[in-house]
Amino acid sequence: MADSKSHRDEGEEVLDALIIGAGFNGLYQLHKLREEGYSAKILEAGSGLGGVWYWNCYPGARVDSHVPNYEFSIKEIWQDWNWTERFPAWDELRRYFAHVDETLQLTRDIYFDSRVTEAEFDAALDQWRVHTADGRDMRARFLIPCLGFAAKAHTPDFPGLEKFRGPCHHTAHWPQEGLDLTGKRVAVVGTGASGVQVVQEAAKIAAQLTVFQRTPMIALPMQQRRLDLEIQQKMKMSYPAKFRQRAVSSSSLIDVIADERAAKDVPEEQRQAIFEAAWQKGGFHFWVGTFSDILQDEGSNLLAYEFWRDKTRARIDDPMLHEMLAPTRPVHPFGTKRPSLEQDFYGAFNQPNVELVDLRVEAIQEITESGVRTSEADYEIDILVLATGFDASTGGFAQIDFRGVGGKSLQDAWAEGVKTQLGYSVPAFPNMLILYGPQSPTAFCNGPTCAEVQGDWVIECLNYMRDRRLTRIEATEEAAEKWAAYLAEIGEGTLLPKADSWYMGANIPGKRRELLYHPIVPDYVEKCMESAANGYEGFALR
Ligand code: N01
């Protein structure tokens, strides 16, 4: 490890905990650690708070969980914070983080522009030594990576990409100063949640918008609404109860409750009424709030897909586009890739300035100086937007050289599949406690909810150790094997393995295919509680 002394202020101080990342998880953890009397700091690669909301400032970026799901349940924070929209945009989320900071005074313990490059466990001292690209060298008893799932953007290796003369940006590396698309010829590659959001905005202002789609997105109506103060004051009366609901509801979303029956067993008229009601409510109601077997049973799943397809086709004028945007048969089961929430994505394709290119018919061959060349045509453009997603979760970990006992690298430890106990701890990587990482609910549980559920568990675990004068915790090999097998088994009971999604690690060429997240939040919470109640079963403590 490099031995830079450019940040001498850190000296030989050994912190109780070093957190990596100042998104929801890192910030909550810092707050709780300080409350419990631990010394802690955050190292953050960006120049501001918010994690993904710092990096993803592309036009149209907004959250997909309705208010008040996507916020902390800490009363001092929510009591005098009000949103302007039911699904807030990135700039409002940034203002929210500023409010969180003002309330909890967090930034005094955060180093910004400080990207962690290496972290090594010192087994003689039971400490982590952490090095950053800007030359910090720090020590802590516990290392708490809060990297989020989208720390590593995926840029496909299109031949000639470096030749393109105009601005070219991945959505997760959008220029902080913004980029005006007005009157430009814009190309967007990718139609995941990021692509859908950019397309909606670009369609309004671009002279020409060309959308390159490989797989049709199953986008659901957001049903966005303005929120006024009066509505929110009323809503706040039930906030404590609603926040408690987030971690016990199988959707992990407030008031999104699925009918217990199998969709296919419900009489047609009744089923259509339930689908329609969820559709009108908007957001993820139609994904996880109709029938409980939608993500388990192919027959029921197809019924949801057909409802979506017919509703969606009715909004697209050109019949030629029906098959491209809303195919007769699903490409993968409905909901096995995270649906995007749209406001006017499908309507955009009725505009004369918007063109859809089906990459399954004409593949991208290269990027030229002036545009995109497919097997069929040259598309001349001014701006290229790559909305091509992320090397989710494990990609973020691979960007840091984590070394456990005996110098073992995390990359090697996970070469044959991710191994953790409950997503928190990796065998041979003592005192590293991961939040919102792989093998946790992460993708199936919104950020603030997971931050609180997992964050509280970690704090209790640290207190348990402090009370007993224990200095070391790590997952046992046996427990980690069992947890991986358990997640695979849960996955097999669902339709999730049938899609090439980032949930499955299947969106990245060459990445190992495995279900990266626990899809049932209440079950996960129960398993965590069980382990804690049994003296942190599955972990070796000393
Ligand atoms: O990424 P994605 P995303 N050639 O992986 C295509 C969260 N999020 O950034 O489906 C051509 O979903 C790829 O095609 P295919 C949210 O959890 C939330 O959009 O692999 N195309 C796909 O269309 C979300 O699920 C919000 O065939 C290529 C797209 O790029 C997660 O982040 C907003 C390609 C990638 O879609 C990721 O969303 C934004 C190639 N070589 C993101 N490689 C909110 O609303 C990839 N693609 C809160």
Image (cartoon, rainbow, N blue to C red):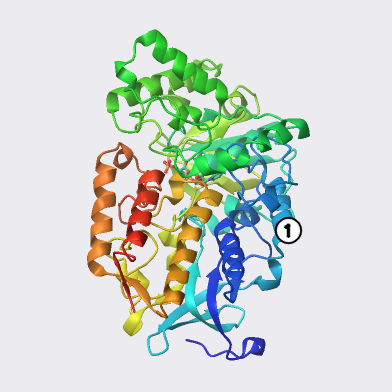
Question: Outermost residue toward the top?
Answer: 269
**Rendered position, 257 above or below 102:** above
Q: Which residue is at a point 56% across and 43% down the rendered structure image?
A: 243
- Say whether residue 71 is visible: yes
**Rendered position, 287 above or below 404:** above
**Rendered position, 133 above or below 289:** below
| Residue topped by disc 1 | 103
Q: Report whether 95 appears left or right of 357.
A: right
Q: Position of residue 527 (x, y in %)?
A: 34, 53
> What secondary structure is found at the residue carrying circle 1?
helix
Residue situated in front as seen by the camera: 226 or 31? 31
Q: Position of residue 482 (x, y in %)?
A: 23, 58
Task: Place residue 295 in its image quadrant.
Answer: top left
Q: Neighbour class for label 1 at 10 Å: few (<14), some, many (≥20)?
A: few
Residue situated in front as seen by the camera: 277 or 329? 277
- Say whether residue 64 is visible: no
Q: Amino acid at mark 1?
A: Thr
Question: Outermost residue toward the front?
Answer: 467
Quadrant (top left/top right/bottom left/bottom right) for the C terminus: bottom left
Q: Report whether 352 appears left or right of 436.
A: right
Task: Place residue 394 in its image quadrant.
Answer: bottom left
**Rendered position, 174 above or below 420:** above
Q: Position of residue 25 (x, y in %)?
A: 55, 59
Q: Report whether 492 appears left or right of 312.
A: left
Q: Report whether 508 appears left or right of 447.
A: left
Task: Place residue 100 in its image quadrant.
Answer: bottom right
Residue situated in front as seen by the camera: 507 or 109? 109
Q: Position of residue 472 (x, y in %)?
A: 38, 78
Mark 1 Cβ inside 8 Å of ligand 1: no
